Amino acid sequence: MKKIFFYIITILSLLSLQSCDKYESPGDEYDFSQNLPPYVALSSTAAKTVREGTAATFTFQLRTALQQKVTVYYDVTGGGVNLLNQTAVIDRDKTSIAATVNIPVVIVPPATTTTATLTLVKAVADDGTLLTIGSKNNPATQKVTINITL
């Protein structure tokens, strides 16, 4: 009886040491080859209300930190504001930068408000690589409406 019990235990232990076949293990077949490239986006695209003659802050963020600086180019246009080719630099190993935009005095009486738009134009790494704009590579969504008041 002891010998039969010993044989059964030996067989069960050998069966438990057998490795799984590659095609029988459902967790081993994940495909990570199609990863998302680095991108730059505005942290918020919600409209901002700003008094003329003051400053507004806008945050640009990277999906992941890079081992090089990234220069972000943006424009602020409309409503009498014409700030083209503005830049903000995200430092190496950082994921965001807060850019300050000075809103000039642009409202002409009798008007009490006007509207401008901040548009994220492009982002370039130090090695010249163009980064994707927005997580879905749709630059048209990377805009902020700026409501300028007196």
Image: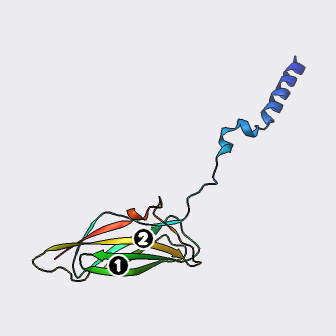
Looking at the rendered image, the quarter that the C terminus falls into is bottom left
Q: Residue furthest left?
A: 110
Question: Considering depth in this image, is 135 or 69 the residue closer to the camera?
Answer: 135
Q: Amino acid at mark 1?
A: Thr
What secondary structure is found at the residue carrying circle 1? strand
N-terminal label among 1 and 2 = 2
Q: What residue did someone put label 1 on?
A: 100
Q: Which mark is residue 60?
A: 2
Q: Is residue 96 left or right of residue 25?
A: left
Marks 1/2: CA distance? 11 Å
Does 120 sit above or below residue 18? below
Q: Position of residue 85 (x, y in %)?
A: 40, 81
**Residue shown at the point (64%, 54%) measured from the top left:** 33
**Residue shown at the point (30%, 81%) measured from the top left:** 82
**Residue shown at the point (51%, 72%) measured from the top left:** 94
Q: Position of residue 36 (x, y in %)?
A: 55, 59
Looking at the rendered image, the quarter that the N terminus falls into is top right
**Residue shown at the point (24%, 75%) measured from the top left:** 79
